[in-house]
Image: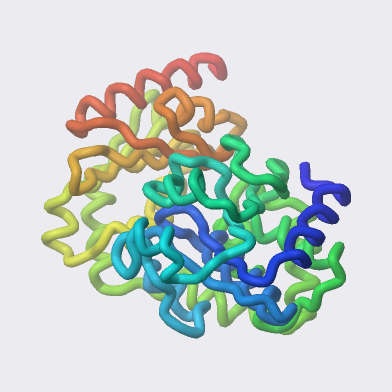
Amino acid sequence: MANSVNFQKAVDLINQSSSILLAAHTKPDGDACGCLVAMSEVLTGLGKEAKLLLLSPLPRWYEFLFAEKVPIFGQDINLQQLTDGKLGDFNLIMIIDTDSFSQLPQFDKFLKKTDASILVIDHHETGDRLGAVELVDKTAAATGLIIFDFLKFAGWPVTEKVAQALFVAIAADTGWFQFPNTGSRVFRSCAELIEAGVNPTLYYHKLFQNFSPQRLRLMAAMLNTLELHFNGRFATQYLLQRDFQQTGATYEDTENLINECQRISTVEIAVLFVELADGRIKCSLRSSGDIDICKIAEKFDGGGHKSAAGAYLPGPLEDAKHLIQAEVEKQLKTRQ
């Protein structure tokens, strides 16, 4: 767990740095996006040169957080250009919302050769200990909570924009305060952020009432594949490449769709299988009870949290479904 000793090490590292690159995991979610914006605002306020880099395209519904377009690694700048200093010459690299090389495809090659110090801020169960300094708290519902505590420790201003970004981070990673990770720490922190100027109704609309027609059609296609197993305790859904082609939706439109089948009262574990363009199957897992699905994801070199995890499996779809269902069955048998 992140403590005052590590917080002070992080403060010292930032104070010693003049140019800082911030990046998060591929397929950035609300926690990653909110934390990137919050830390960028704080660092700029401290007089640092702060640059953001995304490892994959930004979901449309998080665009409102960013004042300007953020370069995308692999599209706007490649590994050689980054190594040559096209984006800047950095003293410090901050890795947000992950501590795993597997979540930093291709960017991990840059990290392994850079001379810059690395600071990690993360809350996931799995990690490779990438940073010289690490603020890792596996008990935190969101990385946004760690950053909020860090800013208070450092005595750095939490402006209205910083508060808004951190509120989005926390709200997104708790499913608007409905996931099992929602506890008193979440509500206490969010109360402080609201007092700093956050309008919860506005951000609920931006986060959860902002579907495009394409995303809604994709959700309809997914719901049509719903299957229940083990007396309704296990729910599976899937999306194929043809579903994206027929609906006009993108991969980013799949975020949080897995939560829909958890509305079924009997469901303890839910999995959404998404066929990727390269033939792999992305498996997103959710647990609404005490079952630790991170253990399932880790069997396939994935990771995450006890109640939310993911992994990539080779295709075809049916093979991936059988592999995951076999592991789920083992978990459910322990809770007969």
User: Is 163 located above or below residue 311 in the figure?
Assistant: below
Rendering coords of residue 36 (x, y %): 57, 67
- Is residue 84 toward the left or the right of residue 178 in the image? left
Rendering coords of residue 22 (x, y %): 56, 64
Instruction: Please name the residue shown 40% across and 56% down the image.
Output: 27
Residue 209: tell me if it is visible: no
Which quadrant would residue 323 be assigned to in this image? top left
What coloring was used for the rendering?
rainbow
Residue 297: tell me if it is visible: yes
- Is residue 280 toward the left or the right of residue 175 in the image? left
Q: Tell me the quarter of the image containing the N terminus.
A: top right
Report the label total: 0
Rendering coords of residue 233 (x, y %): 44, 30
- Is residue 104 toward the left or the right of residue 160 in the image? left
Instruction: Please name the residue shown 47% across and 69% down the image.
Output: 208
Question: In front here: 156 or 248?
Answer: 156
Instruction: Please name the residue shown 36% across and 56% down the image.
Output: 79
Question: In front here: 293 or 59?
Answer: 59
Q: Tell me the quarter of the image containing the C terminus.
A: top right
Rendering coords of residue 138 (x, y %): 69, 41
- Is residue 258 toward the left or the right of residue 280 in the image? right
User: Is 188 located above or below residue 325 in the figure?
Assistant: below
Instruction: Please name the residue shown 87% across and 51% down the image.
Output: 4
Which quadrant would residue 167 be assigned to in this image? bottom right
Question: In front here: 106 or 91?
Answer: 91
